[in-house]
Amino acid sequence: MASKTNPAAPVLSTRTLNRATLARQLLLRRTAMPAKGAVEHLVGLQAQNPKPPYYQLAARLDGFDPEELSGLMASREVVRIVTLRSTIHTHTADDALTLRPLVQAARDRELTTFRKQLAGVDLDRLARLSRELVEERPRTPKELRDELLKEWPDADPPALSVAARCKLPLVQVTPRGLWGRSGQVALTTVEKWVGRPSKPVPAPDATVLRYLAAFGPASVKDMQTWCGLTRLKDAFERLRPQLLVFQDENGVELVDLPDAPRPDEDTPGPPRFLPEYDNLLFSHADRTRVVPAEYRGRTWNNNQGYSTLLVDGFLAGIWRLDETKDAAVVTVEPFGTLTRTQRAEVTEEAERLLGMMTPAAAGHDVRFGVISA
């Protein structure tokens, strides 16, 4: 599938792509979908930190209760595991058992960058030993690394940790990730944690369709950006007869599911508060469908991501939530000037967020700050 399409293919404007993506992401209007169904529909939630998955669902689900997702995690129906783009995601157990084998090729490719640090290390033996250790009992990364260093004392310690993570489908066990609780990272295999074997490596075709349902319309490069895999062109070609073909304003070919929502570009895009690392911002090669070119790079400070604000469907600022014994405060820092109506709508959405996520706080407040240029 070429990057440039037939000029006769219908052109989708940036705003149309924005509205289509927001509709798939449950961000145009909230849905009453159960939390587990949303995790499955979205093909996982970015979970580098424990709290963002809860805030991702708060922005998307009507009447969301954080305890619902926490209960799913406690019952092992959802898990925290390294999958897409070598980052931790919250997935349903079923997806963890299938998606991790699918992206294993990317994990193997990642491991080749540590060849020098792992000189002399038998990676198959490391995988067997690591599995024995973490399936005996969950181990912290330090505990696992210390045991591996006994076998390979001359190896680079961080590289040994990377090797174990790349070779094995390791999940972070609870209480890590539970709502309102804390716990250090402790690891075991997904098979041990959920009591079921992983699936054989699947063809990517079904995942292509799921990606389009959650992030489309999209190009081959978009999906490759989302999952970290390469060489997906053949899968797109196999599926072409059942897909619609479009192009963006730059002439890049996009494909989509025939029955997927593609709302009019004038469909209202309500304000939404997204946590750091929300997949909406990381799942396309061309992010201008959500991130205006002038705001590119403004959601990061070194390696730390900011929580982001959408206004009219596009990135429009950052925000933070501060909790003390006296109050929970949302501070909004817009990148530009909000109209009076937009400011009122943002305030209303912030108040809703506070009521949902910090109901026990003695008080709630919404403040607007200014980002220095």
Image: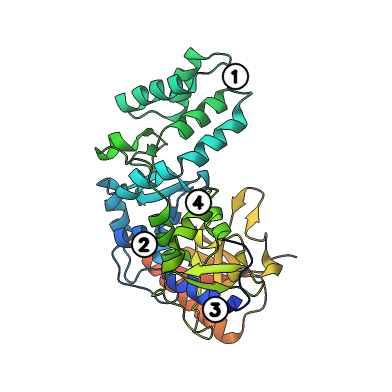
The residue indicated by pointer 2 is 41
Tell me the kind of residue under disc 3: Thr
Residue 278, disc: none
Towards the viewer: 358 or 251 = 251
> Which mark is first along the chain, 2 or 4?
2
> Which mark is first along the chain, 2 or 3?
3
Circles 3 and 4: CB atoms closer than 8 Å: no
> Which mark is first along the chain, 2 or 1?
2
Residue 181 visible to the viewer: no
Q: Secondary structure at mark 1?
A: loop
The residue indicated by pointer 3 is 16
The residue indicated by pointer 1 is 119
Per the model, the C-alpha gap separating discs 4 and 2 is: 15 Å
> Which mark is first along the chain, 4 or 3?
3
Q: Secondary structure at mark 2?
A: helix
Tell me the kind of residue under disc 1: Ala
Circles 1 and 2: CB atoms closer than 8 Å: no
The residue indicated by pointer 4 is 227
- How would you rate the neighbour count of disc 4 (Cα within 10 Å): few for under 14, some for 14-19, many for 20 or more? many
The quadrant the C terminus occupies is bottom right
- Residue appearing at x 37%, y 46% in the figure: 202
